[in-house]
Image (cartoon, rainbow, N blue to C red):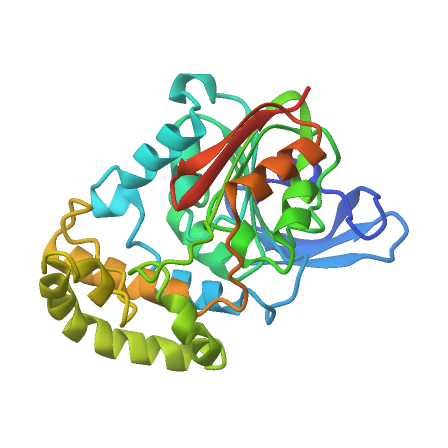
């Protein structure tokens, strides 16, 4: 972490600027270990492995730390030689690559850094936050980078000053928080006037499909430790994947049959090799069954969030992983 990045941090507890203490720097001058402390000396934050840790490990986001550190490279464009993350990012945000250079972007929920990489490649100044130890996976993907400020922190208590960012980006996160509406509203105050925000979330559905079958199983799977659930998913998904593919091909009822056993099978949907299909299926099946919270929304729900926040140019509709929302701050 560059010292200049650390100087932008604000204590969400006291509202005071954080300063460095007891610093260990590497040969390039980046802060590897140390302590941040606010002016009142009431809020002390450790820096470990280049990352300020505003939250302790062990919370509702534990499953994400487990999955992204195990399967860090699966969805990273720069490592899988695909362009799926960039395509999804630019298609659904509506942002243009050539307009992002030099902009400050808050990324709420970075995971292993698939979208972090896209924004860094566009020349943006990316401030990425995740509550889980997925930040360590993101660092392995994207660090060290002069334009990256990586924080382990809480979406409800973001350690930056208001009106600081030109863009706010939050994909794959809101449905996994205790209160998705409040999580969304907590982001808006960090967006400068004239700035843009882009979010997505799962959509509510009463139909039994491949993508909704998880709700039959989650009352059981969320009681398991992430390690135990991963062992189960890694055992059955590779065996079930070819069966699931055959079931999906049955006319009229195939889309119902694949709703019985959760298996995130992208055969015929994404340009993945057989090995990639297996890895993506394991990763996303775990992602569906493991998180403590999974709170899908309706388009009307999400639209009301944007209006409550007083945003302009609101566009909410189907897309990405369910619902996408884009707007600007007046």
Q: Estimate the x, y position of residue 6 in percent, counting from the top left.
A: 67, 42
The residue under the point 16% across, 61% down is 254
Question: Is 235 drawn above or below residue 291 in the view shown?
Answer: below
Indicate the quadrant containing the N terminus: top left, top right, bottom left or bottom right: top right
Indicate the quadrant containing the C terminus: top left, top right, bottom left or bottom right: top right
User: Depth check: 149 or 35 in front?
Assistant: 149
The residue under the point 53% across, 58% down is 295
Q: Is residue 130 left or right of residue 6?
A: left
Asked whether residue 145 is in view, the answer is no
Question: Is 104 drawn above or below residue 185 in the view shown?
Answer: above
User: Depth check: 321 or 63 in front?
Assistant: 321
Number of marks in picture: 0
Q: Is residue 80 left or right of residue 9?
A: left
Q: Is residue 115 left or right of residue 223?
A: left
Asked whether residue 96 is in view, the answer is yes
The residue under the point 71% across, 40% down is 160
Q: Estimate the x, y position of residue 284 in percent, counting from the top left.
A: 33, 60
The residue under the point 46% across, 44% down is 144
User: Depth check: 221 or 216 in front?
Assistant: 216
Q: Is residue 111 left or right of residue 167?
A: left
Q: Residue furthest right?
A: 40
Q: Estimate the x, y position of residue 63 in percent, counting from the top left.
A: 47, 68
Q: Estimate the x, y position of residue 305 in percent, counting from the top left.
A: 64, 39
């Amino acid at each position: 972490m560059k010292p200049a990045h650390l100087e932008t941090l604000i204590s969400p507890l006291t509202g005071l600027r954080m300063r460095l203490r007891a610093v260990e720097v590497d040969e390039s001058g980046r802060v590897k270990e140390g302590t941040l402390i606010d002016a009142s000396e009431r809020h002390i934050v450790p820096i470990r492995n280049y990352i300020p840790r505003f939250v302790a490990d062990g919370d509702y986001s534990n499953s994400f730390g487990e999955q992204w550190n195990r399967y860090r490279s699966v969805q990273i464009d720069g490592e899988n030689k695909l362009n799926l993350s960039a395509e999804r990012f630019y298609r659904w945000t509506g942002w243009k690559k050539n307009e992002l250079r030099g902009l400050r972007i808050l990324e709420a929920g970075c995971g292993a850094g698939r979208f972090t990489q896209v924004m860094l490649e566009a020349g943006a100044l990316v401030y990425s936050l995740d509550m889980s130890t997925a930040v360590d996976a993101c660092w392995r993907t994207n660090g060290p980078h002069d334009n990256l400020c990586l924080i382990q922190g809480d979406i409800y208590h973001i350690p930056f000053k208001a009106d600081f960012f030109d863009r706010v980006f939050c994909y794959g996160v809101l449905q996994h928080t205790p209160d998705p509406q409040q999580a969304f509203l907590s982001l808006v105050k960090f967006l400068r006037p004239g700035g843009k925000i882009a979010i997505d979330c799962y959509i509510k559905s009463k139909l039994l499909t491949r993508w909704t079958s998880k709700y039959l199983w989650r009352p059981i799977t969320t009681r398991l430790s992430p390690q135990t659930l991963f062992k189960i998913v890694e055992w059955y998904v590779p065996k079930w994947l070819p069966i699931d593919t055959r079931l999906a091909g049955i006319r009229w009822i195939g889309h119902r049959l694949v709703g019985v056993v959760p298996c995130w099978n992208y055969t015929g949907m994404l340009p993945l090799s057989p090995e990639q299909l297996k890895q993506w299926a394991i990763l996303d099946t775990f992602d569906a069954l493991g998180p403590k919270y999974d709170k899908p929304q309706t388009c009307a729900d999400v639209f009301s969030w944007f209006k409550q926040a007083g945003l302009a140019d609101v566009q909410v509709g189907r897309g990405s992983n369910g619902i996408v929302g884009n707007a600007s701050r007046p």
